[in-house]
Amino acid sequence: MTVAALPGPIDPPRRLLMGPGPIDAYPSVLRALSAPLTGQYDPFMTATMTETQELYRGVWGTANDATVVVDGTSRAGIEAAIVSLVRPGDRVLVPIFGRFGHLLAEISERAMAEVHTIHTDWGQVFTTAAIEEAIVRVKPTLLAIVQGDTSTTMLQPLDEIGELCRRHGVLFYTDATASLGGNPFEADQWGLDAATAGLQKCLGGPSGAAPITLSDRAVEVVTARKKIEAGIREPGDPSAPDFVRSNYFDLGMILDYWGPRRLNHHTEAASMLYAARECARLLLLEGREAVIERHRVAGEAMLAGVQALGLEVFGDVAHKMTNIVAVAIPDGVPGDAARAALLEDFGIEIGTSFGPLAGKVWRIGTMGYNARRDAVLTTLAALETVLRRFGVAVPAGGGVEAATDAYAGA
């Protein structure tokens, strides 16, 4: 390629990302990404890692010492938790109520677990009784469940499951990628042994860092399985049942890296660490409960707005996440073409869905930096215009008016 043919500097178009994630990052998070780099053992870097741990204890609602950030997208956190907690042959129970439950089951299978699943209709959640029945029947080592599944917009209640798992001697893990920061989460109070998330939804950052917290009980499991220490110890027999079949995602080694000895594991992704730190700092600066309330108010305004436009809301609204709503695509409207018009004419992105909901619903998010009044009203006004263009009779200004009223009554 000649110099003349080289592409110019990166210059993305301005978008308002109102889908299921990723979303627009907070401006100060973007600024944090551009901060100068330091070496991984520079006193500033190690102090920043320690600060980030303490900040995320506040985000998770935990006193867990083992609260760190895994370098990688939210899926990296999921994989690290499962491959480090699950030995080959262990039974893992996965209650599935959307696409991401299937992901937990697949990763558990790749970890050579004996995977058992239970299912409920998309748009519904599980009762505690249904989960207990499955635990008694399966006798799993680990219960792995999603808290908020963006494919269905449902939020699984977790507050009674921890006690249930303790009573039956089961480790309790949840993926809170889509829900953390915008919905209540109490790691200690709910008895979580492991929880993982990402930055790109309610936490208001870019994808690429996965906060994780582990209980003392979970730490005992992962540290017992650790076979290699910073490349110094012999790996042992790789066929041994206890051997973690990933170097990068071995939480025992990652905890050593984040712990007081700072044993080398990988080169910390400094810019993403800065971003993760800033996401947590902003949440705690505003106040954890205040941020959850902001998401609730924005979500209720968007819900009122789409209903006022005559759109049918999908799923059990009583168990909907605060930060996303799914609506049925009106009959006769080409869903992808309407989404494209919203993007091309207004710079607004909303999402479609997966599996049985593919092409049937749009998913509209109100999360992180975008859980704010102007973003909600702008999206509803643009959506009304696009619906009219595709022949849908909607009340003039109905969505914006309903959302404005919802904000006024909040």
Image: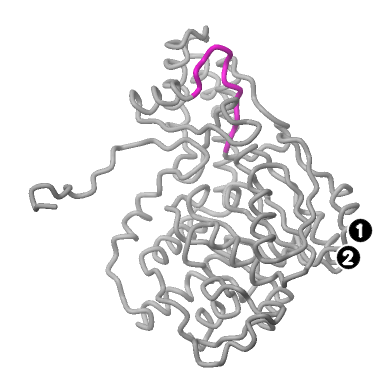
Per the image, the residue denoted by label 2 is 168
Identify the residue at image location x=64%, y=55%: 175
The residue stretch that appears in magenta: 324-335
Image location of residue 186, percent across then percent down:
69, 58
238 vs 20, left or right, is: right
The mark lying in front, picked from 1 and 2, is 1
Per the image, the residue denoted by label 1 is 136
Give the class, few, some or many, for how many residues have Cα within 10 Å of label 1's Cα (few <14, many ≥20): few
Which type of secondary structure does the marked residue at label 2 adopt? loop
Please tell me whether residue 345 belongs to the stretch shown in magenta: no
Give above or below for 293 relative to 62: above
- Label for residue 228? none
Position of the C terminus by quadrant:
top right
Give above or below for 392 relative to 38: above
Give above or below for 32 relative to 100: below
Image location of residue 26, percent across then percent down:
40, 49
Which type of secondary structure does the marked residue at label 1 adopt? helix
Image location of residue 192, percent across then percent down:
72, 63
Q: Are marks 1 and 2 in contact (CB under 8 Å)?
A: yes
Please tell me whether residue 328 belongs to the stretch shown in magenta: yes
Depth check, front residue: 198 or 335: 335
Give above or below for 305 relative to 232: above
Identify the residue at image location x=56%, y=63%: 77
